[in-house]
Every structure is written in structure tokens, then in C-alpha cells.
Image (tube, grey):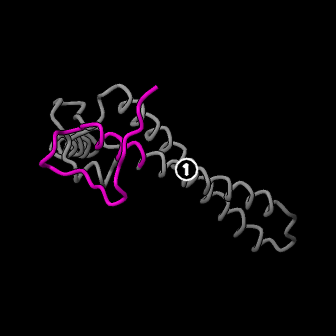
Amino acid sequence: MKAEIFLPVDYRPAEDEPFMNDRQREYFRRKLLTWKAEILSESRETIEGLQDAARNIPDLTDRASEESDRALELRTRDRQRKLVAKIDAALRRIEAGEYGYCEESGEPISLKRLDARPIATLSLEAQERHERRERVHRDD
């Protein structure tokens, strides 16, 4: 059993402390768990809303509009399902001690980038290279 790590409410990871120390890992772990809980809560609300909306609408235009809204909502939920999988992967990396390091170079990912995108697996430079390669292949 791990000891509880104390984090002040206003704690933010700083560049002048050791990278991915216990406090930083705990900060990102909590941030990821909160994000995941919010997504799952929204998902439950959507499912309840879709069940409530599954009624017979006689007007064809209204029915088409309702179906379009449902399709959009389901696509959004699918994206969020994939996001939850990425959050789970980030939590596993925290547990394994691999979180915060670029998958490509092994270098630390900037704290600003991790704070903005806690599921990031690439440094900004590696991400930009990856996106440039994708654009080149898409243009083929």
C-alpha cells in the first residue's frame, strides 16, 4: 500500500523541482482521474437522455432532426470512449513510472504540455514531426 501524498490545493508542477517526482505524479494522477470521472458522468447523462428520447415522433422532419442529433451525440461519445482509454493508458504509465517521458525520444515532455494535455505521449517536437509526416502521407 502506497503512502498518501499530500498536495496543497494550489499545487502546480514547477520546472525547478525534480521531474516527475512523487508530487508531480500525484498531481497528474488526480487530474486524469477527475477528467475521467467527468467524461463518465457525461456519458451516463447522455445514455439517460437517449433512452428518454427514444419515443415515437410522428413528424418526419422532427424525427430526422432527432436522429441527426442522436448520431452526433453517439459520435461524440465514441470519441470520449477513446479518450477514456487514453486516460487509462496514462494512469498505467504513471504506475509504471513511465509517465511524462516522450515515447519517441525518451526525453521529458514539458510540464506545460502535460498540464494542457495530460494524455500526451510525445514531446512537442516529436508531435510536430509526427504531424508533418502525417500531412506528407495524406498529400500522397
Q: Please say if 24 is above or below 11.
A: above
Q: Is residue 26 magenta?
A: yes
Q: Which of the pair 98/133 is nearer the observer?
A: 98
What predominant SS class does the magenta segment belong to?
loop
What residue span does the magenta drawing correspond to? Answer: 1-30
Residue 108's x, y, as percent? 17, 37
Number of disc labels: 1
Residue 27's x, y, as percent? 35, 47
- Residue type, numbered disc 1: Ala
Q: Is residue 91 left or right of residue 22?
A: right
Q: Which of the pair 75/137 is nearer the observer?
A: 75
Q: Please say if 59 is above or below 2.
A: below
Where disc 1 sits, the SS reads helix
Q: Which of the pair 14/45 is nearer the observer?
A: 14
Residue 101's x, y, as percent? 23, 34
Q: Can you identify the residue that label 1 sits on?
A: 37
Picture residue at 80% right of the left edge, 62% below the top? 52
